[in-house]
Image (tube, rainbow, N blue to C red):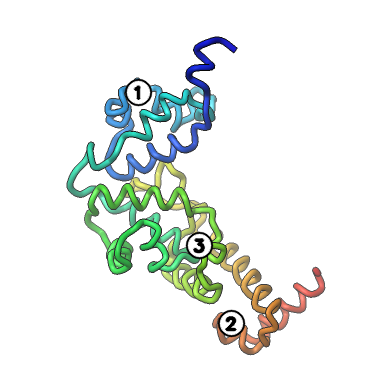
Amino acid sequence: MNRTARIDPLVDAEPARRHIRALMAAGVSADRAAHHAGLKRCDVTDLLYSIKGRPPSRRIRETKAQKILAVEARNVVTGRVNATGTRRRIQALMAMGWPQVHLAAQIPCHDRYVSEIVRCQDGVLSRTAHRVATAYDRLWNQDPVQHGVPADRANYVRRLAARRGWPPPAAWDDDVIDDPQASPAAVTEMNRRELAAYRRQEIAHLTSYGVAEAEIAARLDLGAEYVHDLIRDLRKAA
């Protein structure tokens, strides 16, 4: 290993990549992020995009990562930005079962403001967009139940999101979630599959605690026959 490599080692690029995504959600372009970090444009775009068949960089020099992470949206953009990506991120997390009050604690902000974001069709403060994007990158693949959300509440929020047609994170690519013209991928089928998987998970969880079938059906707003058949299949599989 040469002297330069020892002084400036390679590190995981994911934290820097997520930070750039959060900056972009707050209205900071890749060019501006690079400028304020004192880096070349390619130092940022190489983290975001595949170029000539080469995937985004998985490793980055530590000093470059530190410069990117030091860029704060509030020092680059003030005022309001388009709310599309912020709204989609909140809705996608709710499709995973995150209640608004728990999201408010993660962002952080008042839970009433989360309700406003969900309905917002205009603009949000750039610092809010940045905070939501940062929380989203942290939570998009996390089970809310493992973070203190009651199972029945998580299930209720997932059903609510499904009824409103809000797609989960898997339906959104990072490159398009902020684009008002972009559409989610296979929303209907994906929601159907994920909702069915969550139902099985919740029924198995409640059954393990000895909750009666009739009560499970009432809690989850499901048919008694559906719950009975699914419990039977779960027991067979076990």
Report, in whole angstroms, how far the alpha carbon at label 2 lies from the one at label 3: 19 Å
**Secondary structure under badge 3?**
loop
- Of the two numbered discs 1 and 2 in the rendering, the one whose residue sits closer to the viewer: 1
**Secondary structure under badge 2?**
loop
* Residue 113 spot, x, y in % from top left: 28, 64
Crowd around label 3: few <14 · some 14–19 · many ≥20 (10 Å): many
**Sequence order check: which comes first, mark 3 or mark 1?**
1
Quarter of the image for the N terminus: give it.
Answer: top right
| Amino acid marked by disc 2 | Leu
Report, in whole angstroms, how far the alpha carbon at label 3 lies from the one at label 1: 35 Å
Residue denoted by label 1: 41
Crowd around label 1: few <14 · some 14–19 · many ≥20 (10 Å): some
Query: Which quadrant of the view contains residue 22?
Result: top left
* Residue 142 spot, x, y in % from top left: 54, 56
Mark count: 3
**Secondary structure under badge 1?**
helix
Crowd around label 2: few <14 · some 14–19 · many ≥20 (10 Å): few
Residue denoted by label 3: 96
Residue denoted by label 2: 222
Q: Is residue 203 above or below residue 22?
A: below
* Residue 47 spot, x, y in % from top left: 45, 30
Residue at 47% from the left image edge and 71% from the top image edge: 157
Residue at 30% from the left image edge and 34% from the top image edge: 29
Residue at 49% from the left image edge and 53% from the top image edge: 140
